Amino acid sequence: MLDLRLYMMQRLSAMFMAPFVLVHIAVMVYAIQGGLSTEEILGRTQGSVFWFLFYATFVIAVSVHSAIGLRVIAHEMLKLNGLTLSVLTWGICLVLLFTGGRAVTAVTLL
Amino acid sequence: MTLLEDTKYLEVEIWRGDAAGGEFQSFQVPAYESQTILDVVSWVQQNTDPGLTYRYACRVGMCGSCAMMVNGTPRWTCRTHVKKVADGDRLRVAPLRNLPIIKDLATDMDPFFDKWVAAEGKHHPSKSREDQIEQIDPENSARVEANSGIECINCSVCYAACDTVAGNPDYLGPAALQRAWTLYNDARDAKKQVILDAVSGTGGCHNCHSQGSCTVHCPNELNPMKAIAGLKRETAISFLRKAR
């Protein structure tokens, strides 16, 4: 159920995600050290092109990676095939892109 | 059958039926020293039920015909000793997993061999009969890699052991992919990209979860999981080269 193209998309998205996860966790740990409030955090992220690009890329990588991973599980465990499987894959990808995109814009746009 | 008092018996359950369904049937089989699972099945067929259907040929681990599920594990029955796998004195013998059943212990091997062909597990000649025979350096790293897979006897034990095949019937399976990897590393094979393309489809090597059941159960101690990892690596390199 995974051809080479999907396999490469999943592996390459994982390569992107690994440093993103580490930076995300490191920044969270750093940010709460001094008791930073929500307003202070948003003051630093809103309007920041860097954090917008960082989390936007993160959300795209997560959406692609998760959709392909769940596609394999749905095929092997639920025996989904063909159009149903494609709709599920794209559906998961689009839902994650939408919800992740909302979060990114809320945190980084002014 | 009359049981003899001074004879020790094995409690053997053998699956009987066909593609439409079936059930296990119990037999009591005299226990002997150095007895193999194939000996047990043959004893039942020769002494108790001539209608029992199973497949074997060489009896010495060469032909790959006699693989069956023994107490839930795929094994080459001609080289599997009862004393190593029996649960006390109990044995449960069933047809190979992941293959259609023809009758009793005989499975239809067509899907298994069809996938060898689908994975381009066939020789693609690089020379004609007029050419000189290619000199092969046995120390060459690609040749060493190819040699590591050539002892496969097509028994389908790895195919029966594979949970990915169970979940995804289109998956080519460990044996076919290992054959493809062997030919990919063979200097005499002319169509390496054809092999990579054949193992890159929806049922290709990228479906392998690297669980390693194939390698654990291979009776010849081959390593199909490593071969599949090699195919994943080479197809990924090929993909990135094409993208450039």
Image: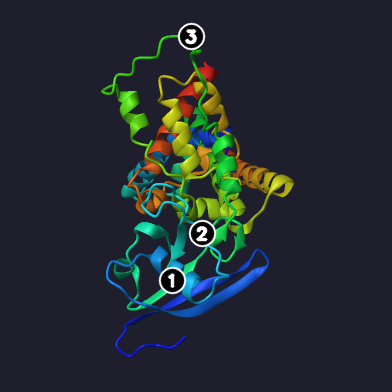
Mark 2 / mark 3, whichever is N-terminal: 2
Dot 1 corresponds to which residue?
Answer: B43
- Numbered badge on residue A11: none
Q: Circle 2 marks a residue in which chain? A: B
Dot 2 corresponds to which residue?
Answer: B96
Q: Circle 1 marks a residue in which chain? A: B
- Calculate the distance from the C-alpha at mark 2 to the C-alpha at mark 1: 20 Å
Depth check: B241 or B140 in front?
B140
- Calculate the distance from the C-alpha at mark 2 to the C-alpha at mark 3: 44 Å
Depth check: B46 or B15 in front?
B46
Contact between marks 2 and 3 (CB within 8 A): the answer is: no
**Residue B25 percent coordinates (x, y):** 53, 78
The answer to whether residue B74 is left or right of residue A99 is: left
Q: Amino acid at mark 2?
A: Leu
Dot 3 corresponds to which residue?
Answer: B130
Q: Amino acid at mark 3?
A: Glu
* Residue plotted at (40% across, 19% down): B187
Pointer 2 and pointer 1 on the same chain: yes
Neighbour class for label 3 at 10 Å: few (<14), some, many (≥20)?
A: few
Mark 3 / mark 1, whichever is N-terminal: 1
The answer to whether residue B227 is left or right of residue A79 is: left
Question: Count the marks: how many?
Answer: 3
* Residue plotted at (46% across, 63% down): B69
Of badges 2 and 3, nearer the viewer stands: 3
